[in-house]
Amino acid sequence: MPAGATMSDQDLRDTVIATLRRIAPEVTPGELRSEIDKGFWYVHDVDTSLMLRKSTNGMWEELVKRSQQQQPPLPPGALRTSL
C-alpha cells in the first residue's frame, strides 16, 4: 500500500479473512459460524485506528475489555441466538 493510503473497512476485513484462512486452513465450512453462534468468539465492527496502530502493547487486553462491555459472556451451556 502506498505511503499515505488508507485501507477501507472492507479491504481490512478481506485481508483478515484471507490471513485466517492461511493460518487455519483446517477449519471446516460453517465451523466458525457455529462457534460464533455458541458465543465462543467476540464479533465487532472494524476499528482501523486500533488494528493499524504501531504499538500492539495492551491491544489484546483492550479488545477483551471492549468485548465484555459490548457483549457479556454467556453462562456455561448457553447458546447465542443472534449477533
Image (cartoon, rainbow, N blue to C red):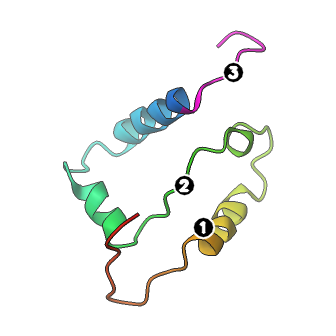
Image spot of residue 39 (x, y percent):
39, 72
User: Is 48 rendered above or below residue 62?
Assistant: above
Secondary element under disc 2, as helix, strand or loop, is loop
Specify the farthest residue to the top.
2
Image spot of residue 48 (x, y percent):
67, 38
The residue at the point 72 percent across, 45 percent down is: 50
Mark closest to the chain's N terminus, 3 or 2:
3
The residue at the point 35 percent across, 75 percent down is: 80
Q: Residues within 10 Å of mark 2 (few under 14, many from 20)?
A: few
Q: Where does the magenta region start and end?
A: 1-9
Mark closest to the chain's N terminus, 1 or 3:
3
Secondary element under disc 3, as helix, strand or loop, is loop
Toward which corner of the image does residue 47 lie, by quadrant? top right
Label 2–label 1 contact, CB within 8 A: yes
Q: Residues within 10 Å of mark 1 (few under 14, many from 20)?
A: some
Q: Which residue is mark 3?
A: 6
Toward which corner of the image does residue 12 lie, by quadrant? top right
User: Is 81 rendered above or below residue 13?
Assistant: below
Q: Which residue is mark 1?
A: 67
Q: Quadrant of the C terminus?
A: bottom left
Q: Find residue 44 and name its label.
A: 2
Image spot of residue 53 (x, y percent):
77, 39
